[in-house]
Amino acid sequence: MKIANWRTTEEKEIREISAEIDGFRLWYRLPVSYRASRAGDPFVAAALLPSMARGESLEVDPPLSVSPRLLKNLMIIQEIQHAWNPIFKIIPIHATASPAAPLNTGTLSFFSGGVDSTYTFLKHVNEITHVVFIQGFDFYGRRGQSSAVSLDDLCDLTQLVYKLSFGCDPVSAFLKGALSASTRQALSESQDPSSDLSALEEALVSDLNRILSGPSIYDAKRFGGIKLRPETEDALSQNVRGENAAGLNRLLLEDAYPLEIARDRNLAYRAAIERNTRFVRGQGKTLIPVETNHFAFGYRYNLSRNLTQGSALASIALLLSFPRVYVPAALAYDQLAPLGSHPLTDPRWSNDAVTIIHDGAEARRVDKVTKIAGSASALANLRVCLGDMNSNCGRCVKCLRTMIPLQLLGAAGAPFPSYPLRAAVRKINIVNDIERTFFQENLELAERTDEGGLRKTLAACLRRYERVQLLRDIERVIFGGRIKRAYQRLKKARGGIYRIDASPANNGAGFRSAGHSESHRRSRVPRA
Amino acid sequence: MRITGWETRERGETKETSAAIDDFRLWFRLPKSYPVSQAGDPFLAAALLPAMLKGEPLEVDASLAVSPRLLANTPRLQDIHHNWNPILKIISIEARRSPAQPVNTGAFSFFAGGVDAMYTFLKRCEEISHLVFIHGFDFSVDTDTFRTAVARNESFARGFGKTLIPVETNYYSFGYHHNLSRVLTQGGTLASVALLLGFPRAYVPASDHYSFLPPLGSHPLTDPLYSNEGTEIVHDGAEALRVDKVIKVAECAPALANLVVCVDDMNRNCGQCIKCLRTMVTLRSLGVTGALFPPFPSLRAVRGMKWSGVTEPRFIQQNIDLAVQKGDRDLERALRACLKKQERIQLFKDMDRVLLGGLVKRIAGKFRGAPSNSRRVATLPPRD
């Protein structure tokens, strides 16, 4: 795998730094007022896991140099990633070594306005000068005003190919039918994991543009299950005859594939930046919005977001080159499991100029929420919901696990819908041991503070999880996992996407576990 | 908690360096030919966890300087231990600061002759100049046994052109004095010896693999945090599975001939304990025999293996994978039967816990009598 053709361009106060990796142009966009590294470090950080997944050596084009400290650290990162998931091979890295120097002054922390990043922000508020807000986790904005789809607009090619191949929904079925015969052929061949997607990618873009430039693709039945944005509704009402529908079709396509196809810098993103900027400015700090197609790059190699998270943050940290960068921890020290961002790996992405610190793993989630509840402005800015960047739905598991401690703590001014929590908590399905720990922490808080009966509901919820786990253990031990395997075969037959994760236990690589679950932290749930 | 009264005195061929930590004099004895650190660092590393358990500030006598790098690392070290087991409190440390310097030259690795230490030694053989062999893990071992082990390991090290440094300490008694378990104090002990000897690099052989890192006294997150400016402490070997370590050891005849894994004896392998059995199983798959091992027991002994802790099933699974790879169907069946039996026992315990709220366990506990009061503080809070 080769990193080549590094370039920087400027457009409307935004600087784009990019390089070609294996024919894909990986880019980062940030305000022109910040200096950015001209070294290969950010791109080496980004390309390491894809190279390891392919088992190919990584070569950095000679005009780009890489920090010797980073090169040394990458050997240890490789050992760890390989130990976690042997699908990642240890590979040689060929690059010209040259020490890096800091380019900006101050201390940076990544910030999304959620529990982990708000906690780290409050904990280091005296030291932090800047926060980085990233767009590109789920989708990224497109450049230019043209309605045509470009190669760069495909945020998640793997997912798009999967949906079209299987005609998962009416729009995908319609589009598949409208593709040329050769593209359909390439689609079916793409099911082979070793196939090269670049030819298919170009064919898809060409076909999609042909379809977009035709009559309106809207059909009430076809788009029945899709939530249309207000701008799409407007375009639809202005184009009832369905002619010259390229603009409308593009909007419809973006709505049908919200995570797969780039959309115009949307209102939600702008609102999130404005809200978070207001919050950090109130504390005398500066927000740096950064856009990237890093995750789309990872998806090309079938790498999960959980896996590429650490390298994505590292590449942005190395690009901005502040001397110190905090990466807010998602899991506490006693919950550690292989994950893209981890206290063993995050600091190893540091180079001579940038020290990357995995921060906040000492605090349990409930402790973090307690700290946030002590700051009115941080609490008012708290957004934990995956469904929306700017509001908390109050119904999803992330919202609920945050609302519970806030209610128990009697925190006023929390930006969550207000309603009796017990009924919603009763319906929660805890899906893994980590989520179980969060609810266990909430239960322990409830035992100390609860007056409204939440304790009993939480205990019942946890007991249900324990029973489900017990059933799974019975299935594994008594039936040798046959029922689970049959279920998985059925699931695979329906064509689910199995992305490569930090640990084989989390992906579809057929890992056979050692038999025992990590039960050393499983504690008893008090009976209601 | 206070660290005072640092002193060093020679006794015959050994030098004893000690300090009083509150009412306990902690000492380390090593050959007098090696200079030792005159700083407070080794005793700070030793006293940190006891002070955290007491929840008392740790004060180092002004006559002893402590490395700023070590002091800067202690908040994170404390954060980790406090998160693992909240009984260990975050404390303040008062000490005079002065950067440390290396006291000896070269690189050493801790060495007990077991699989982990042997693997790290072979992997880093070119770089390693010395091996440190500690007596003090278990004082039930008599001096003669220790001397025999020193002579055996010295001869092994000499064969590779390396030097063995025998170190005696009463560290574990110190830990027990504060009711701390050995699994918790392990990292601090090795760190205090490393900081006392002051070699620029000290390797701590890893016992667990990166893919499964339960809280433990010696851990890749904590070991490096005990480093100071003079000594880099490296947690080494977590990238290798246990069977891969045994494979590496088996490829080196002198290493295989010197391999002792048994917890019951320093100089030979009993062949019956879980550590012996798991290693002998791997050696059988590889078709080799260690000189210090008895003949391979029956497969019935393999089927009957018992253990406590969460890592053993992983070692068994690795041995199953190896047996499959080598086509040893009998061994594979025995290992699978052993794993299955333990899984059923665990399932029964889980059923009792989830469905009966631990009723069976409580009744069994009543029959067994009251739990021992000697339960020591470990890396994690007790599970019940």
Image (cartoon, grey):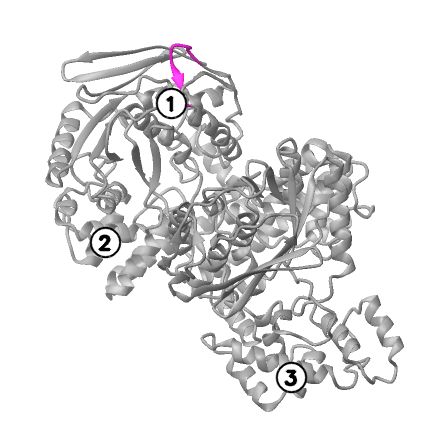
Distance between mark 3 and mark 1 Cα atoms:
69 Å
Dot 1: element: helix
Q: Chain of mark 2?
A: B
Asked if the stretch drawn in magenta spans residue B66, the answer is yes
Distance between mark 2 and mark 1 Cα atoms:
35 Å
Residue to which mark 2 is pinned: B247
B274 w.r.t. A450: above or below: below
- Which residue is located at x 58 percent, y 76 percent? A494
Residue to which mark 1 is pinned: B46
Residue range (magenta): B60-67
Within 10 angstroms of label 2, few (less than 14), some, or many (20 or more) residues? some
Q: Which disc, if any, is residue A207?
A: 3
Give A310 or A19, whichever is nearer the viewer.
A19
Within 10 angstroms of label 1, few (less than 14), some, or many (20 or more) residues? many
Asked if the stretch drawn in magenta spans residue B324, the answer is no
The amino acid on which the numbered mark 1 sits, given as a three-letter code, is: Ala
Left or right: residue B296 compared with residue B305: left
Left or right: residue A6 compared with residue A178: left
Is tag 2's residue or tag 1's residue first in the polypeptide sequence? 1
The amino acid on which the numbered mark 2 sits, given as a three-letter code, is: Ile
Which label lies toward us, 3 or 2? Answer: 3
